[in-house]
Image: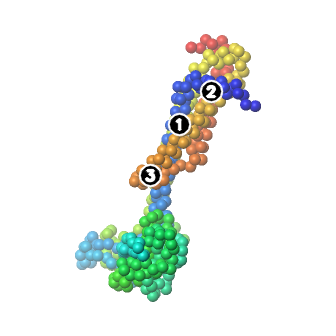
Amino acid sequence: MLDLDLWREIFQSINKNRTRAILSGFTVVFAIMLFGILFGMINGLNNTFTEAFADDANNVIFINSGTTSKAHKGLQAGRRIQFENKDLQYVKDDNGDKVEYITARLYKNVTASYKNEQNNYNVRACHPDHQYLENTLMRDGRFINQTDIEHRTKVVVIGRLVEKDLFLRTSALGKYISLNGIMYKVVGVFEDAGGDNEERMIYMPVTTAQFIYGNKEYIDQINLTYNPKMDFDQALAFSNDLEKKLKARFSVAKTDQRAIRVRNMAEAKKNVNQMLFVLKLLAIVIGMGTLIAGIVGISNIMIFIVKERTKEIGIRKALGASPRSIVSIIILEATLITSIAGYIGLFIGMFILRQFGPALEEYFIKDPSVSPSLLISATIILVLSGTLAGYLPAKKASKIKPIVALRND
């Protein structure tokens, strides 16, 4: 049964020694709060990088053209490198089954309108494979297909937020929108994990854009995914080989970093994962250090509390109290203070993360949060430590003879 007298005595002791209880609890509150904030910020960094890679396939390679920075083979620096359809076909034919999906990209800015609604958007003209590179999820209708490419069809696939902006509460599927005064049929509406910017994008067949905007065979970018069976070293060697061959194709110096740039997302993701691993390891070390500091602080305070109550223990023993009852009252007091303080620290830490989370986004910390189970586990560790810290000195004090305890200064 619940011993009400025992608990009444515990609360009376805490109330009588409020300063002591507050100092004991503050150590726990600070340790749990700091532990939670630290892991929350690490998780925020992880969320930032996860979102950055969310809208692209993990095995994607981006090939961009630029301007030469070095003279080579009699050609002057400052020469503009321009990709064409034939270069896309060259990459595809030359690499065979090393390439999984491949697409060109052509960028345009347009003013889109439907009835009385109007807004400015970016257009990506591309091939059907683009859907798999961008992890584009079709909500309604379909994506661009090979028939659209072959017949230069005037169709578009719009993002969810484009539909929301222009069509308000009606469905865009099957309707016609004007892009710079030219009508296109909406054949699909997509969603994208990349966020609002991606969902305010419009896709159209690359051949349609080349025909309408009069840039003939020109494309701005070549994107592809390599065979997923490749390991990291093979993927890196493949992207390096691609860069070498394309530089040779366009008579670009091997050391020219501006003319043709090949970016392998596998390499970028590996670097990010390594950095996050180091950060998590650092957080664990600092977090464990914080918990250990909290444990040491609790232990020191409990030793002081028991020493301070030595005379009280002597009186209890003189009145017939058993060593077990003396130990239990000190342990329960230590456990109660540690538990309450631990959960106060838990809620303060989570509150700080929730309140200041939006302001941290400019420092690349997105939605900083920490698993409640992690904080609860840390709190339980401190509670157990506080219990143990109270038990050892209490057990020792309970063995002191009453006459010795009463003489203690």
- Between discs 2 and 1, the one toward the N terminus: 2
Q: Which residue is mark 2?
A: 11
Residue type marked 3? Pro
Q: What number is the disc on residue 44?
A: none
Disc 2 crowd rating (10 Å Cα; few below 14, some 14-19, many 20+) is few
Mark-to-mark CA distance, 3 and 2: 41 Å
Residue 107 position in % (x across, y down): 37, 74
Considering depth in this image, is 321 or 100 the residue closer to the camera? 321
- Between discs 3 and 2, the one toward the N terminus: 2
Mark-to-mark CA distance, 3 and 1: 24 Å
Residue 47 position in % (x across, y down): 49, 56
Considering depth in this image, is 102 or 116 the residue closer to the camera? 116
Assign the C terminus to one quadrant of the image: top right
In terms of secondary structure, where does tag 2 sit? helix
Q: What colouring style does the render use?
A: rainbow
- Between discs 3 and 1, the one toward the N terminus: 1
Disc 1 crowd rating (10 Å Cα; few below 14, some 14-19, many 20+) is many
Q: Farthest residue in the bottom direction?
A: 151
Considering depth in this image, is 147 or 268 the residue closer to the camera? 147
Residue type marked 1? Val
In terms of secondary structure, where does tag 3 sit? helix
Mark-to-mark CA distance, 2 and 1: 20 Å
* Residue 291 can be seen in this image: no
Disc 3 crowd rating (10 Å Cα; few below 14, some 14-19, many 20+) is few
Q: Which residue is mark 3?
A: 358
Q: Farthest residue in the front direction?
A: 116
At x 65%, y 16%, the residue is 314
In terms of secondary structure, where does tag 1 sit? helix
Which tag is nearer the camera, tag 3 or tag 1? 3
